[in-house]
Image (cartoon, helix red, strand yellow):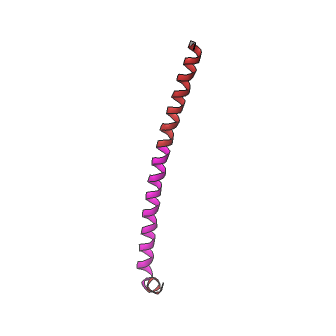
Amino acid sequence: MHKSGRNRQQSEKMKVNELRRKLARLVRRIEETHGWLRMVEGLGESSSEVKNPEEVRRS
């Protein structure tokens, strides 16, 4: 393989590695967001139980 082919392979490998890093970062952000949403959802449920205790008991 000549030099330009080797350079192209290295360039493609760098692109793949960069995409892997971006994907890993995105997955972490999604997991963090999901955790926040679950926490907020739990707070909302707790809040409605405090505001309407009779309604919660009936359901």
Residue lying furthest front: 1
For the point 46% across and 66% down, which residue is it?
41
Q: Quadrant of residue 4?
A: top right
Depth check: give the residue in front, 7 or 57.
7
When the figure is inspected, residue 43 is found, relative to residue 8, above or below; the finding is below
Depth check: give the residue in front, 51 or 22.
22
When the figure is inspected, residue 28 is found, relative to residue 1, above or below; the finding is below
For the point 44% across and 86% down, which residue is it?
54
Q: Quadrant of residue 57?
A: bottom left
Main secondary structure type of the part rendered in magenta: helix
Depth check: give the residue in front, 11 or 56.
11
Image quarter of the N terminus:
top right
From the top left corner, tell me how far across and down residue 26 is, in percent: 50, 45
Q: Which residues are magenta?
A: 25-53
* The magenta stretch spans residue 50: yes
User: How many labels were placed on the picture?
Assistant: 0
For the point 45% across and 73% down, which residue is it?
45
Q: Quadrant of residue 6?
A: top right
Residue lying furthest top: 2
When the figure is inspected, residue 27 is found, relative to residue 17, above or below; the finding is below
From the top left corner, tell me how far across and down residue 37 is, in percent: 47, 61
From the top left corner, tell me how far across and down residue 42 is, in percent: 43, 68
